[in-house]
Image (cartoon, grey):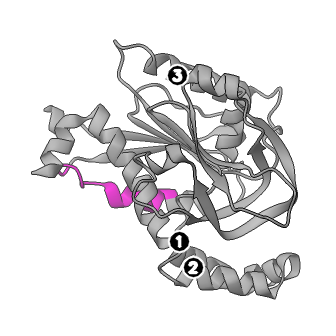
Amino acid sequence: MSLSSKPVKVAVLDLYNGVENQGMRCIREILASVHGTYGGTTVTVHEFDVRSKTEIPDSSYDIYISSGGPGSPYDGEGSKWEAEYFKWLDAIWSQNTDASTPQKFVLSICHSFQLMSRHFDIAEVEKRKSDSFGVLPVHLTEKGKNDELFSKLTDPFYAADFREWQVLQPKMKSIQSLGASILALEKIRPHVPLERAVMAMRISPEIVGTQFHPEADPEGMFHHFAKEEQREKIIKRHSKEKFNQIMHRLTDPEFLKPTYHTFIPSFIEQAIQVTRPELFSEHSK
């Protein structure tokens, strides 16, 4: 098998704990769209049910995407799945710091980002006073403006933000010891005397975490929220005004569309540039 015909291997770590969700659908669709893009190379995707079945990928994958999920980021304390998940994170970190082994790229989304923040002790992870729900502005830090994954987005950009927990009070000593960088913060709320949560952090050149959902597909999310059951649930919990705002921002191409079409595709491209440069050169011809 030639190097160019060897597939790009992607592992998706499903942290939804068996709960029906839109996140996994969106991730699957993005990965399906990448198939064959780089020199016609196959992209193979394997899913691992982390919380329900304690399924953890091995180190043979090029790219790892760890999903969002319901519930508290402390739900797994003392469980086998969390111990195995943190062991996997440590193994990836160790491999990436060893110059003799291939680098592995990791994207941790929402619940996974909260777990990663706990494990690396880079911030506090706390329950919000009220949940954040909508397509909301996210502000870049100076580091974020220069980061490859955010450089094509405006400041602020808009992202799907659905969370009851948050990463805040970053621990700068831990962050600096890892060589990590805070890339984005939540919307500015001048009328609320509360600290702004961390919305994205680069832990290393290969590992990045986002509190928002970069996989959120505006068209698919619109159809999901337009279902009567979902519509009534949102109006009851958040108000009709909030529902109308979300639906407007899902249909207006200025809001969610740039994030959906830019962030994860840029992450995958960056990973392939580093781990499989021969494919990227084929893609560029």
Left or right: 146 as drawn, with respect to 176: left
Residue at mark 2 to residue at mark 1: CA–CA distance: 6 Å
Percent x, y for residue 62? Answer: 38, 34
Question: Three-letter amino acid code at disc 1?
Answer: Leu
Element type where label 2 sits in the image: helix
Question: Three-letter amino acid code at disc 2?
Answer: Leu
Q: Quadrant of residue 180?
A: top right
Residues at discs 2 and 1 in contact (Cβ within 8 Å): yes
Residue 265, labelled with which disc? none
Residue at mark 2 to residue at mark 3: CA–CA distance: 36 Å
Instruction: Name which of mark 1 and mark 3 comes first in the sequence.
Output: 3
Residue at (69, 46) in percent of width and height: 111
Residue at mark 1 to residue at mark 3: CA–CA distance: 31 Å
Within-10-Å neighbours for mark 3: few <14, some 14–19, many 20+: some
Q: Is residue 214 visible?
A: yes
Percent x, y for residue 154? Answer: 48, 64
Left or right: 182 as drawn, with respect to 143: right
Percent x, y for residue 86? Answer: 66, 26
Q: Which residues are magenta?
A: 27-40
Is residue 33 magenta-colored?
yes
In the displayed structure, would residue 114 be above or below residue 192? Answer: above
Residue 256, labelled with which disc? 1
Element type where label 3 sits in the image: helix
In the displayed structure, would residue 3 be above or below residue 22? Answer: above
Residue at (20, 43) in percent of width and height: 280
Residue that numbered label 3 is attached to = 93
Instruction: Name which of mark 2 and mark 1 comes first in the sequence.
Output: 2
Residue that numbered label 2 is attached to = 250
Name the outermost residue toward the left. 285
Q: How many marks?
A: 3
